[in-house]
Each structure stands twice: as C-alpha cells, then as structure tokens.
Image (cartoon, rainbow, N blue to C red):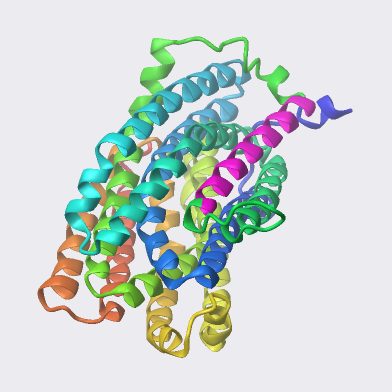
Amino acid sequence: MAGAAVHTSLQVGTTNRQIIKIALPISLAILVPQVNFITNNIFLGHYSQHALAVASITGVYYLIFAMIGFGFNTGLQTLISRRAGENRPEEIGKLFAQGVFITLIIAVAGILLTWLVAPWILRQVLQSGQVAEDSIEFLRIRIWGLPFLYVYQMRNALLVGTNNSRYLVSGTLAETIANVLFDWLFIFGKLGFPEMGLNGAAIASIIAEFTGMFVIFVVIHRKGISRRFSLFSHFKWNNENAKLIMSISLPLIFQLAISIISWEFFYILVEHHGQTALAVSNVMRNVFGLIGCVTWALAATTSSMVSNIIGQGKQDLVNGLIWRIVKISTGLSIIVAILINLFPGVLLSIYGQDKAFTEAAIPVVRVVTAAMVMMSFSVIWLNAITGTGNSRITLLIEMITIVLYCIYVYVVLEKYFLSITYGWMSEWLYWLSIFSLSVIYMKSGKWRNKVI
C-alpha cells in the first residue's frame, strides 16, 4: 500500500488545485526552518541584545552556503521535473546521486573556508572586536551542519520534482521540534546542561539539521521512493550527469551567492550604525522569512511546474500558469503584510527588547512588508526563467540588480549615513528590477526552444 502511494503520474496540470497541491507542502517545509530561525532569535533576544546582534552577521554568513545548496536544489529539481514531464523515471535516481556527490564536496570546501579564511575577513570588516570574535566562534561550530543541510536539500529536490512534495513536512516538523528543544536546553542551560548562549544555538541547529535529514531519509525509504527511482543503484560518479547538473545549477548558485553576499555587505554597513540597528535588521530578516515562506514555496512550484509543462511539450500554457501563480502569491502576501502593519508591536514584543528597540523597528517594518509584496510577484517571474532551463539569464538579471543594490546601500548607509529605514528601501529597488527584467525576457519568447 505504501509503495502504491508514490506510483502516481509524474506529469502535472496547470490548475489552481495542482498549484496548491504542490505549493502547500513546500510552503510548510519552508515555514518550519523559518520558525527555527525565529525561535533561535527569540531565545537569543531574551538572552542578550548582543547575542541577537551577532546572530545577524552569522545568520547571513551561513545563509550564503545554504543558498549555494538551494541553487543546486533548484537546478536538480528543474532537471528532475523535466525528466518527470518526459516520463523518464529511470534518469531521476542518476541525477539525484550526482547532486549528493557534488554538494558534499562543496560542504567540505565550506567548512575549510569557514575555519581558515572567514576569521580573517570578519576581523577586517567588523568594527566591534567582540562581535567579530563571537561570530567566528559561533561559525566554527555552526558550519558542521552543512553536510546534513545539503543532503536534506537534495532530497527536497527529489520530492518536489517527482510530485511528492507532501512528504516534505515530516522532515521539517522533526527538525523544528529538535531545534526548539535543544535551543532551550543549550542556550539557557536547562535540565543540567551547561549555559552556552550563542554557541548553544549553533549546536542546536546542527542537531536539528541532522534530525530533519534522517527523518526524511526514513520517509523516502518507507514510502518506496528510493526503490522506485533506484536512488542507491546509481550512487557513483557520472561525468555526463554531473556536467548537466552543473550547467543548470552553477548560474543559480552564483546568482544566489552574490545575492546573499550583497546582503552580508548590507549587514556589515548596518553594523557601523551600532548594535541596536544590527539587532533591528536581524528581526527584519525574520519578517522576510515570515512572509517569504509562502512566496518562495510558490516560486519553487513555478520552476518545477514550468519545467514539467515544457517537458510535456505544452509551452503555450506557460504564461497563463505564471499569472495564475502570481495572483495567488501576491494576494496572500498582501494579506500577511496588512496584518503585520496593523499589529507591528505584537510581532516585535516577542523578542524581549525595550521600547527604544520597538520604536526604531516599526518604520523599518513598514518598508520591509512593502518590499515583501514586491517580492511576491517578482520572484515568481524569476523562477519561471529557471524552470525553462535558462539559468544563465537569471544570473545575468541578478548581477545587474545586485550592482544597483550595492551602489544604493553604500551611498545611503555609508556615504550619507542615513537611517537603516532608508537602507532597507534598497529591497524596493532590488525586487522591482528583478520583476522588470524577468518579464521582459519571458515576454520575448527566447526560452521556448531551450533543451536540457
């Protein structure tokens, strides 16, 4: 009975029901890590404002590597979705094995970079020596979770690409429970455990990532997915598939990496404005995650469905599918943004900070929620390009946009030293630029004959 559950059609339709069927489990899967991140910051906020401030630097640093994995996840998902649309399940296991091989190599490189190179960089760019040293100590622990995260991301690509996204929830739920429990134990030193503060959050996150990876591994095995796609029969290096994955994923990785690196640049400039500004900006990243979980789920759904539809030879349905997803994404984002703007104090109060912190944060909340609405439609169009297999175009769009973004934040935050409220308006420039360039490309029709 369990094995039969996964032997459904690998080809998808373009109805709202199909969109929600794919997107809802992905949304829950994205929401859970965001809950983990917010939980970390709530605990750290109650522990000390210094810990909350340091977490903004370390969080974005680790996010760079997480987004590299997400780039491979998206590239692999696009290829798996295309093979699913072509009804070629025998190729899916081969692609998955190569994705795991490649990302584990990158994980080793990330660990070495964090231990040997990152400390020197952080000491050079951060004005506070204490923030720098605490960040280095945290990251040298936190980075050991990277292999678990990458394997987990590859399994997500497999499940979404084969229309089995409903199984994502079990792994992320287990990860959340582990993260909340061990955060409480290690940060504050409960039930006889030592009080570790910021470093306790690092250890808790590693345990949580391992737990999520292990549980989703068990689910895939129990549901017969491993057997259906012969995942471990092809667990050897294959140059042809490796090159194919790299050709799709590398532009996405560079795109995501430069995007997050530019965000790290932003946080470094914010650090020059003081600890409160840094802590406020860290909370704003929570707001991004809160609204973004649905948006990014629909973006992942877009790339997967567009690739699947093209694999079926139904290119004429692509634009209609995009607009259908845009309406859902934007509508939901507007509702969430309105609720946050009606009750910003409630959201900010959970971080246990003083009145001055809340007063400084509320104007930034207004700016960030507006940016999230802009993201809700822009990222759908960008991921549609990913679904066509033209990842080099998404990289080009990202590079143009990042140049504009970095110029803006440097002039506003460093040259004229304006408040971080104006600095966060850089997100408006970023997402409107992404939207304009993505729509221009998709409307050109140049993607129609791309073969992957």
Residue drawn at (45%, 75%), measured in percent from left and top?
Answer: 369
**Residue 418, magenta (yes or no):** no
Left of 420 or right of it: where is 1?
Answer: right
Quadrant of the snapshot with the C terminus: top left
Rendered image quadrant of residue 357: bottom left
Quadrant of the snapshot with the N terminus: top right
Residue drawn at (21%, 47%), measured in percent from left and top?
Answer: 121
Q: Which residues are magenta?
A: 200-223
Q: Position of residue 315 (x, y in %)?
A: 47, 40
Residue 451 appears in view: no
Q: Position of residue 367 (x, y in %)?
A: 37, 79
Nearer-the-camera pick, 135 or 209: 135
Q: Is residue 374 above or below residue 123?
A: below
Q: Position of residue 411 (x, y in %)?
A: 13, 71
Residue drawn at (62%, 54%), measured in percent from left and top?
Answer: 32
**Residue 201, magenta (yes or no):** yes
Residue drawn at (31%, 45%), measured in percent from left and top?
Answer: 257
Residue 363 appears in view: yes
Nearer-the-camera pick, 204 or 23: 204
Q: Is residue 389 above or below residue 412?
A: above
Rendered image quadrant of residue 132: bottom left
Q: Residue furthest left?
A: 415
Left of 336 or right of it: where is 54?
Answer: left
Left of 436 or right of it: where is 180?
Answer: right
Q: Is residue 73 above or below residue 49?
A: above
Q: Position of residue 371 (x, y in %)?
A: 39, 72
Q: Main secondary structure of the magenta part?
A: helix
